[in-house]
Amino acid sequence: MAFKNNINATLILMIIFFTSCKDHNEYRVGSEFSEYLHRFEKQAGDRGKTFNLEAEGLIIEFANLKNNTAGLTHYEDPIRVEIDKSYWDDISKFAGADLMKENLIFHELGHGLLNRRHLNNTLENGDWKSIMCGGENDENREWNINYRGERRAYYLDELFDESTPTPDFASTQLLVDTSGFKSSFMLNFNSPTMAEAGWDIKNNSNYSTSISNGRLKFESKSELIYLITAKISINTVNDFSYELTLEYPTSTDPASQYGLIFGTIPDSTSAPSVKESLEYFTINNNQKMNMGNRTWYSFFTELHKNQITTSGANTLKIIKLNGMLYYFINNIYSYRSEIEATDDGFHFGFWVPAKGTVYLENLIISTLATAKISSRTKKLQTVEFKITAATPFNNHSIPNK
Ligand SMILES: [Zn+2]
């Protein structure tokens, strides 16, 4: 009996030792994270939820996370959040880093402080329903979430209240009037001489261009993607409509993105403060649509759209109205999202996949009728093309969280 009592006493002593050794109220938040934690507390406070984390404890620290993971919450006492250092450093180099960091920290605090689990539902328009998306999803869909503008406001509400009503942007109906645009610039590529069509026919070691059955054929020989733009006199700070019909033959990689680009490329006439900012709207032959801005780490989100023709030409159209971009695929309204490029921009063009060939026809840029551009001006527009090989860095997937 004495022997057994001794063991019990030792166990009790050990338990006391270990429990007192651990500080359940430890508060240790890395300086890089405190701004986002304070924003979280502010958002919670605005919704009647208060935390006293400095007294109750919380740990947010850097780690080297495995398995393509950006953040990890441990349900310990206190809650401990790990953020992958290399992911944090990577996104820090790009525009949008602040929102992406907020998104990541808020997701982890959703687990740790709001006790939320993963929610991989989508809204009617295809957007993720919640910033609590993560873990595993049936479609193998990318975790990229368009956490900006009107969506950020909704995602914050949803984070603190899962019963938040469906937002307007989730509607598959076009809720604005996009009529009234008149074509101001056109290239149909079916002119027999390219001098008339405004396009150089070239064949060099990187790419070749030719006319094929009334369409422009652009064939890339490069491992990089190509961004081809025409500089015209229509400014992307104003409202516009831009459409182009593209075909990317299915014999090539169906996951490769191709589509529209537009926005700002500074030149000698630009103000020194003007930085390159190209928006893109791309699709692939797996019926995936991406949208984003080249200055960001990655595309905003990936959507599955049945209106994408997988074995033929697709007409992509973007309409900018009051700071919002409206995306159309084969004349079906498909998405809306705020424009990022806010400086003067006169470039409109297309995105060609690495080692890919695209066929193009009917490039039409329109402005609101009040712009009153005469047919004579249309023909006299001088076009300066820019062909740039670029790394598709913003094809990055967002790691799991
Ligand atoms: Zn998670």
Image (cartoon, rainbow, N blue to C red):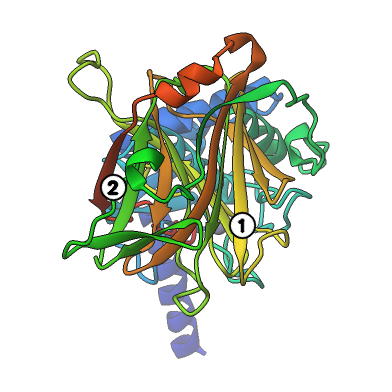
Look at the numbered disc 2 and give the secondary structure of its residue.
loop
Task: Give residue 91's position: percent from left, percent from top.
Answer: 33, 45
Location of mark 1 (residue): 314
Amino acid carrying label 1: it is Asn
Q: Residue at x 27, y 26 (%)?
A: 275
Visible residue check, residue 159 = yes
Is 24 positioned to the left or the right of 304 in the image? left
- 338 vs 180, left or right, is left
In this rendering, the label closer to the viewer, 2 or 1: 2
At label 2, the amino acid type is Asp
User: Which residue shows up at 40% across the image and 41% down it?
Assistant: 197
Residue that mark 2 sits on: 200
Which of 218 and 240 lies nearest the eye of the viewer?
218
Measure the alpha-carbon separation of dots 2 and 1.
24 Å
Q: Are marks 2 and 1 in contact (CB under 8 Å)?
A: no
Image coordinates for residue 142, horizontal then vertical, percent: 53, 61
Q: Would you identify the image quadrant in which residue 134 lies?
A: bottom right
Q: Secondary structure at mark 1?
A: strand
Give x and y (percent) for residue 187: 48, 40
Mark 1 is surrounded, within 10 Å at the Cα level, by few (under 14), some (14 to 19) or many (20 or more) other residues, namely many
Q: Residue 38 location, x and y as percent?
A: 47, 27
In the shown orientation, is residue 21 left or right of residue 322? left
Q: Is residue 173 above or below residue 322?
A: below
